């Protein structure tokens, strides 16, 4: 079974309750099971700083769904929880991102896996390191030893 990691974030309303509700809703999707979840951490916003701090977490799941179907379910959960599209990096009641989907590499419109900026984000790396430190070490190694990386 592939190791799949999702990043969750919220900075509107009861942030912790939103993260916990999203985790329960994800676990309720047919063909998806939450394996473990990180602690909740509070982080400063990235990209657009004039907004409340975020609560973030990472969960590991198992699923029989392919990546595109999982994305569909994630977006459905975000809408169900009241997420409104505003502007890039803006405030949100819930944000759910597919960080890793096993060893798969996907580059399609609206779906890029691995998440292209996760290695730069404390709000991803810290909770991911809590539940899967070996994954973070691999990410750091690959970033440092990628011959195609920009210098």
Image (tube, rainbow, N blue to C red):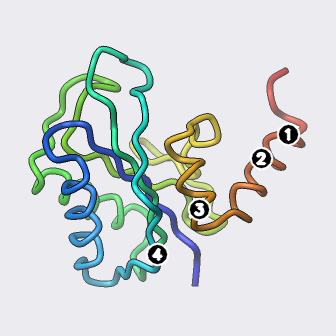
Residue 112 location (% of width, % of height): 51, 46
| Residue 144: mark | 1
Which mark is nearer the camera, 3 or 2? 3
**Does 66 sit left or right of 147 as displayed?**
left
For numbered disc 4, what is the local secondary structure?
strand
Q: Residues within 10 Å of mark 2 (few under 14, many from 20)?
A: some
How far, Cα to Cα, is label 4 from label 3?
10 Å
Q: Residue at 34% of width from left, 66% of height from top?
A: 69
- The residue identified by callout 4 is 36
Residue 33 occupies quadrant:
bottom left
How far, Cα to Cα, is label 3 from label 1?
21 Å
| Residue 130: mark | 3
**Does 121 sit left or right of 87 as displayed?**
right
- The residue identified by callout 2 is 140
How far, Cα to Cα, is label 3 from label 2?
15 Å
| Residue 44: mark | none
State how many labels appear.
4
């Amino acid at each position: 079974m592939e190791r799949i990691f999702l990043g969750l974030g919220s900075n509107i309303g009861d942030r912790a309750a939103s993260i916990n509700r999203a985790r329960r809703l994800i676990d309720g999707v047919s063909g998806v099971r939450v394996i473990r979840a990180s602690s909740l951490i509070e982080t400063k916003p990235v990209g657009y700083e004039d907004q409340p701090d975020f609560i973030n977490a990472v969960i590991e799941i198992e699923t029989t769904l392919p990546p595109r179907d999982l994305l569909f379910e994630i977006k459905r959960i975000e809408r169900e929880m009241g997420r409104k599209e505003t502007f890039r990096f803006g405030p949100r009641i819930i944000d759910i991102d597919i960080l890793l989907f096993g060893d798969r590499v996907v580059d399609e419109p609206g779906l890029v896996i691995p998440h292209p900026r996760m290695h730069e984000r404390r709000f991803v790396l810290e909770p991911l390191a809590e539940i899967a430190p070996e994954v973070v070490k691999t990410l750091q190694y690959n970033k440092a030893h990628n011959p195609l990386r920009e210098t």
